[in-house]
Image (cartoon, rainbow, N blue to C red):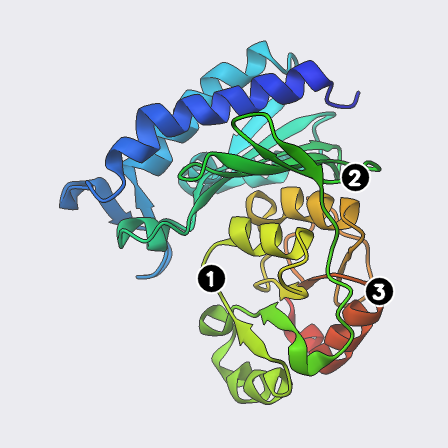
Amino acid sequence: MHVTPQQERDLIAIMQDAARAEILPRFRNLHADEISTKSHPGDLVTAADILSERRMTAAIPAVMPGAVVLGEEAISVDPILRDQIGLAATSVILDPVDGTWNFTKGVALFGMILAVAHREVPDFGVLFDPVAQDWVVAHAGQPTRFVTADGFSQSVHTSDERDPAKMTGFVPFEIMHRHHRQTVTAAMDGFASATALRCSCHEYRMIARGQAEFLISHHKPNPWDHAAGVVAVKGAGGVARFIDGEDYNVARPHGYLVSAASEEIWQMVADRFRFLQADAV
């Protein structure tokens, strides 16, 4: 069953509520004991992440009866939950604060991500900016929209840029395997900008809105980072597949995902970075 217009409104309202109650009061107001480290020093979690995820997880079943709700922080505590993604008939996948590193530094470049998947296929996504109070929303097979809290809504489209020297791409250089870094640097040469925002939410928003041309994922493409963005990019006219050509699915735990404004750009980026495929495990 696809997400209905009423469910869309209710899910976004749940995100707005969590932002007001748990995230925005802590922005630039975190205490040291509200910040912890997960897998490595740059992988942070805060009280805002944990409490907003709990709040949304409690509220979503009333809107999506029967759906399995899976959040990044719950999976961090109990990794076996990751295996449920792709098995459930319907799953709601949450990243309560995407861009936590930026959030902890007081940089307003973070977002909230919500995706709905049916089995392995993402069907709906919201990329929400809690500071600006606007969002990119997408249903599979429908045009992606940019929406503001005052009711403005507009279809968006990916970039039609064809010159690499004018393209912007997002490459997570700092979390790629060290033995690839020199080759990655060489592959990035020739683009106007190859950078990373440390926030998948805003990277996907920019691609969907025609403000950047491509994104390459980490070799572990966590669905809470990518599922909603894939739906948004495709609904805006773009392409998202693993670098080996396989269609994106939320259950696949390894492999570099390439999301691009067009098939032409996808092919160009995949060709340049094909060497990553060898150890995408």
Q: CA distance from mark 3 to mark 2?
A: 17 Å
Q: Which residue is mark 2?
A: 143
Labels 2 and 1: the sequence-earlier one:
2
Q: Quadrant of the C terminus?
A: bottom right
In screen coordinates, is 70 left or right of 230?
Answer: left
Q: Is residue 164 left or right of residue 222?
A: right
Identify the secondary structure beneath mark 3. Answer: helix
Using the image as rendered, state which of residue 19 and residue 272 is in the foreground: 19
Most distant residue in the left direction: 32
In the picture, which quadrant includes the N terminus? top right
Q: How far from the left and from the top, in percent, is residue 162? A: 78, 74
Tell me which amino acid carries mark 2.
Pro
Q: On residue 19, which mark appears? A: none
Residue 275 at least partly seen: no
Asked if 71 appears above or below 188 in the picture, the reply is above
Q: Amino acid at mark 1?
A: Leu
Three-letter code, disc 3: Glu
Q: Secondary structure at mark 1?
A: loop
Which residue is depicted at the point 59% across and 90% down?
Answer: 186
Q: Which residue carries the number 1 mark?
A: 197
Read off the residue under disc 3: 263
- In front: mark 3 or mark 2? 2
Residue at the location (73% across, 78% down)?
274
In the image, which is nearer the foreground, mark 2 or mark 1?
Answer: 2
Q: Earlier in the sequence, mark 3 or mark 1?
A: 1
Is residue 5 or residue 171 the one in the foreground?
Answer: 5
Look at 49% across and 15% down and name the residue there.
Answer: 59
